[in-house]
Amino acid sequence: MGRGRVQLKRIENKINRQVTFSKRRGGLLKKAHEISVLCDAEVALIVFSHKGKLFEYATDSCMEKILERYERYSYAERQLIESVSESQAAQGNWTLEYSRLKSKIELLQKNRRHYLGEDLESLRLKELQNLEQQLDTALKQIRLRKNQLMYESISELQRKEKAMQEQNNLLAKKIKDKEKFVAQQMQWEQQNHGPSTSSFMLPHQLPCLNIGGTYEEEAPEMRRNELDLTLEPLYSCHLGCFAA
């Protein structure tokens, strides 16, 4: 036999009401998860029990993102269905815009405090895990960008070093060619102007060398001539004696 149709009204029995709430709540959370996975839909489910206990489910644990999207959508829907006068519509729009911006600012300030590690007492384990995952993702992107900038800087320095090395090689080649040209020019000048320079300097050098040489060479000769003149009478006398 199948179950009869359940009459939709408040269950008076407290225990039966609690049991039904637990069963229906689990089925509702299960269906929300299934539709989010099967249909690739963003689902946000919020349930408060009669005692005020909160039960929620959000796709990818991003309840705040879905609520913000819902708020924008509701705001656009409310703008479309408003049929008040122009002044009232303008006033209502400003009031609604103010409320929307105020809520968004409060949400951003709350997220900022959470990112700075403040006001974490109100967060549950699941929310803390989500916050940790967001911070890890941000750190990975920061490190990736830092490594990219360092790689670009190193590449630029290597490019400059290579350019400077090529410039140094070019300057060294120019200096070597200049030295070779100067050496060839000096050799050419020695070949073309060397003999005439020697013959031009020879007359100035030869008298000095000849004068010194003549004095040094003629002094012994003069002494020998004087000695011969002195010894010559004695030698003639000795010859006369031997002849007698």
Image (spheres, rainbow, N blue to C red):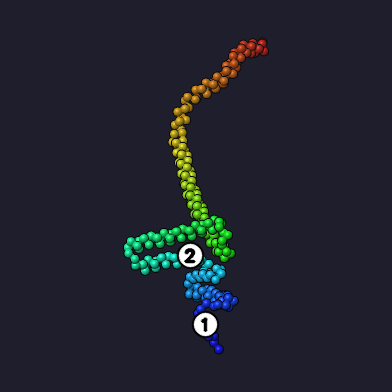
**Position of 182 relative to 14 (above/below):** above
Whole-percent x and y of residue 121?
58, 59
Residue neighbourhood size for the residue with mark 1, other residues' Cα within 10 Å, grouped as few (<14), some (14–19), many (≥20): few
State whether residue 237 appears in this view: yes
Label 2 or label 1, whichever comes before in sequence order:
1
| Amino acid residing under circle 2 | Lys
Q: Give the residue pinned by disc 2.
A: 65
**Position of 50 relative to 205 (above/below):** below
**Is the residue under label 1 in contact with that under label 2 (CB below 8 Å)?**
no
Q: Which residue is found at the position 55% from the left and 56% from the top?
A: 118
Residue neighbourhood size for the residue with mark 2, other residues' Cα within 10 Å, grouped as few (<14), some (14–19), many (≥20): some
**Position of 115 relative to 203 (above/below):** below
For the residues labelled 2 and 1, the Cα–Cα distance comes to 36 Å
Mark 2, secondary structure of its residue: helix
Place residue 98 in its image quadrant: bottom left
**Residue 192 or residue 70, whichever sits in front:** 70
**Residue 163 or residue 34, whichever sits in front:** 34
Q: Which residue is found at the position 54% from the left and 78% from the top?
A: 11
Whole-percent x and y of residue 146?
52, 55
Whole-percent x and y of residue 123?
56, 62
Residue 6 disc label: 1
Q: Which residue is found at the position 57% from the left and 21% from the top?
A: 217
